[in-house]
Image (tube, rainbow, N blue to C red):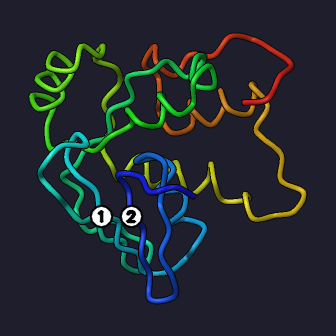
Amino acid sequence: LAPTNFYVKTKNGEWWGNCAWCSLGVAALLQDDVKITTTIGAETEQIEINIISGEIQEKNYFIHFPIPMKNAWDNVIYTCSNMLVFESEEQIDKWSKKHNIPKGDIQPIDRIWNFSKKWYGNHLNPDWAKWTIEEAKEMFREFELNDRIWKLDDSNERF
């Protein structure tokens, strides 16, 4: 993996995560105490997110999802590069305006942590396959990811 804005570390190793969501997925797969180092809005203020005994310690952060999920794979590098951590909706508003990126859905980090544990939970299984569109929609509903950003069109493809 190439260096990214998300650095995931345990006592047993270190990895880069592509985005806030993927970094939480890496943490879920490791099933260990984890420190994620990143910056607010991929800019200057560095923060740490600690997961100890399966619980996020810093619950005051939010993850911004500006790219509609139905378009996530059109340019997954761009999609991931914009799934970032923030301290408030006001901060996201300023960041979106500054970078001319539409404001999307804002989710508390602990909700995305719980979602990530299920979403990524089976990724180490050699028989793992991407979720079907219907499975993804159901999981979005389960974790109350109801904003327009999470809407997927019906399809036989996988997400």
Q: Is residue 100 left or right of residue 22?
A: left
Q: Is residue 38 left or right of residue 111?
A: left
Mark 2 vs 1: CB contact within 8 A: yes
- How far is the residue under mark 2 from the one under mark 1? 5 Å
Q: Amino acid at mark 2?
A: Tyr
Mark 1, Cα crowd under 10 Å, few <14 / some 14-19 / many 20+, is some
Residue 69: where, in percent of width, then height? 55, 23
Residue 6: where, in percent of width, then height? 38, 56
Residue that carries the numbered disc 1 in the rendered image:
37
First of labels 2, 1 by sequence position: 2
Q: Quadrant of residue 133?
A: top right
With respect to residue 118, does 135 lie above or below?
above
Q: Is residue 20 left or right of residue 1?
A: left
Residue 45: where, in percent of width, then height? 12, 52
Mark sitting on residue 70? none
At mark 2, the secondary structure is strand
- Residue in the image at 25% along x and 43% along y: 42
- Residue in the image at 38% along x and 64% along y: 7
- Residue in the image at 75% along x and 11% along y: 154
With respect to residue 148, does 45 lie above or below?
below
Q: Amino acid at mark 1?
A: Thr
- Residue in the image at 48% along x and 48% along y: 18
